[in-house]
Each structure stands twice: as structure tokens, then as C-alpha cells.
Amino acid sequence: MVIGVSGPVDVELLECDFGNVPIPSTSTFPLVSYYINGLVKRGYHVIVYTNSAELTEPTVLRSKQVTLCISPARPQPGRRIFKYEREQLKAIMCQNPSDVIYAFWTYEYAWAALESGIPTVVSVHDNAFKILLTQPDMFRLVRYLMNTIVLHKAKWIVANSAYTYHNLSASSKKKAVIIDNFYTPYLGELIPADTPKENFIVSVVNGFTKRKGIPKALHAFAKLREKFPALEYHLLGVDMEPGGAAQQYAQKHDLQEGVRFIGPSSQDELMQHVAKAKVLLHPSVEESFGMAVLESMLAHTPVVGGKSSGFVPYLLNHGEAGVLCDVVSTADMAAAVEKLLLNQDLADEITKKANAFAKANFSEEVVINKHLELFDSILNTGNANPPLLTKEKAAGTLFNS
């Protein structure tokens, strides 16, 4: 079985050798690269379909087990509903076909795969409608329309959590199964449990939006500084860089005292930084999964997350593996972080429980094996109904606990 993977790929994280050839920059998401690496480790040949704004012509690179197909992209794709990007991706898929395609997100990468004629499993990683409600702009409206079209066209859907599944329409649920996100073993072994903590808390967030919650988190930190004047707050991710949207907001509202604006980092740098933090504050109001939370659990850093923030309560085992609070309330966020700062025994207990819960439920071995069962079922029978797909049970675990 040759498996296609369509989505944003961090090429630098791929464990394969394409030789000494220049590789254009692509849209990146580490989970996609770890997924490809997991398939390669199990002996599969993987054809990767992604794109780059640096190209005007498609490029195909080959290693022993990975074929990397990069199609061109153009600026401002939302204005044309990603039509050019979809056509280019579809063309390179048809020229380099796989047996089945696993497409990340319900947008251009999935739409192109569905139009290629190759059996395609669409992986749902967010709730486009809820994102539109919290970010009501033309781009998000286009993404919502694309999501609606893709889910209608898809024959097989994977929801990346019980929360994501719960938010699908009734018709999409009939085509969907639940397979959680996972962490690569590399991350699980990267950080020793006794990494010394430094006097800062951290948030890892991509995007300065109401949905991601950084504005309220900055106000919450200002309250914390009143009791812990030496404490720092480090912000990592897109829009968190010096001079970026987060710093501009902090300066405008006089909230920059004690805040370090770091911005995007490599996966290794991010994990090392999170491991040194006393607390990871995750202020997002809605998460379909929450990879930053899972990574913090692996890095032995206790998490404060939203009690109603999508999948976050389940990821934190309903408060057993983290501290849950109302992330809409700056006072409640500050109090939750303070609770961990003042009680080291509690922080240590939560950290141990979180690390154990993450390893027991979200390992690469468990999750990728479920994907392989799904692909076998589709290719052999045309159905997606192996025993692993107990979606009602999984949904009940989240919403009846």
C-alpha cells in the first residue's frame, strides 16, 4: 500500500534524505511530518502532496521511501477560493498517484485530493463555523464555505477528537470515525522529568485572535505580576514575535511589563522552552484537540486550560491532569496559575498524572495503527468500519464524564 499525505508539511522534520537539492519553503505543521515519519518507520512508501509560494512550476523530490510533491501557490488565495492551488495540487496528485490519500484539514489540500479520484480520507482538525464566529472576516468565510463543500464531498472522514466529532453535522457523522491526534516518541523522550524550572510561565499560540485568548491572558498576567513581581510571561508562536500583533496590543494597553515576545520557534526549541516554564497557560476558548497542551504534558510542565475549551478538558482528564478554569475570566485564569505557583506539591502531582495520561492515550503506536486499519478497510472492502471505530463510546467519554 502506497499512502498519500496531503497537507502543510515541515520538510525539515521529515526523517528522509532528498540529497543536496534546494527545497522551497512550505506551509508547515509538525504533526503532519511526524505522521509521515510514523508511516515510514512501519515500512510504507509515502507520497507527500503540499505546496509552496516560492514555486512557479511543480517539483518532485524522491528519497528511498518518501516522494515529496510540491506544487506552486500564489498570494491571496482566499480571493479565488484557492482555485489555483487546488488545481495544481490535483494535477500533481494525478501525475504521482498513491493508493489512498490522507488529507489534513477540510480545505484546499482535502478538496484537491477528493477531486483527484484517489480514495481520500479527510481529517477534520478544527470547527470552521466556530472559527468564523470568533474571527468574522472574509477569509474565514471562504474557509467555512470550503469546509462545507469538502465535508459534503468526502466519503470517509476522521475527526481528531470526540469533541470534533460531536460538532460535525448529522450527515458528516455518518461518514466519520474518531482517531485522536498523537505525539511522536521523539517528543516523549526529549525532555527529562528533572529539567530545572525557571521563573516564567509560557503560552504557545499561533495567531493573535479572540479565539486564541492571548489578549485576556495578558491581562491575567498583569494581575499575577501584582503578587509575583519577578515572574515573566513568555509568548511563543505566530504573531508572538517582537513587534508582532501580541506586543502591539500589550504596548497599547500597558501590559508589556515582564512579557517576553519570542515568536515562532523550532520544535526542539519550543519543547526545551516549555520544559523550563513553571506553568503553561493555554487561554484558547476553543480547541478541536490542543497539541500545545499535549506537548506541555510530555515536557513535564503543568497546564492551565479552559474548562469549556473544546477538547482541552478531556485532554487534561477532566482536571486530573491539569487545572481547568474559565479562560474568559482574567481573574479566574490568574487564580488558576497562582494555585500552581504557590503549591509545588500540587504542580508535581499534576505533572506526573499528565505525563502518564498522555503516554497512555495519545502515543504514535496506538494512533497510527488505527489509521492503517482504516486504510486497509477502505481499500479491501470500500468501507470504514473496523472494530476500532467506536465513535459513540469515545463521544460518551468526553461528554458524559
Image (cartoon, rainbow, N blue to C red):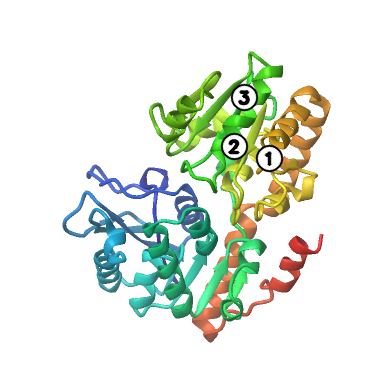
Give the alpha-carbon distance from disc 2 to disc 3, as whole Å. 10 Å
Amino acid marked by disc 1 = Ser
- The residue tagged with tag 1: helix, strand or loop? loop
Q: Nearer the viewer, residue 334 or 279?
A: 334
Disc 2 or 1, which lies upstream in sequence? Answer: 2
Tell me if I can see residue 104 in this picture: yes
* Residue of label 3: 222
Disc 2 or 3, which lies upstream in sequence? Answer: 2
- Quick check: 103 above or below 259? below
x and y, in percent, of residue 223 in the image: 66, 25
* Residue at the far left in the pictured view: 56
Residue at x 56%, y 69% (from the top left corner)? 158
Residue at x 41%, y 75% (from the top left corner)? 99
Amino acid marked by disc 3 = Ala
Find residue 329 and name its label. 1
| Left-right relation of 387 to 152 | right
* Residue at the far bottom in the pictured view: 381
Quarter containing the N terminus: bottom left
- Quick check: 174 above or below 108? below
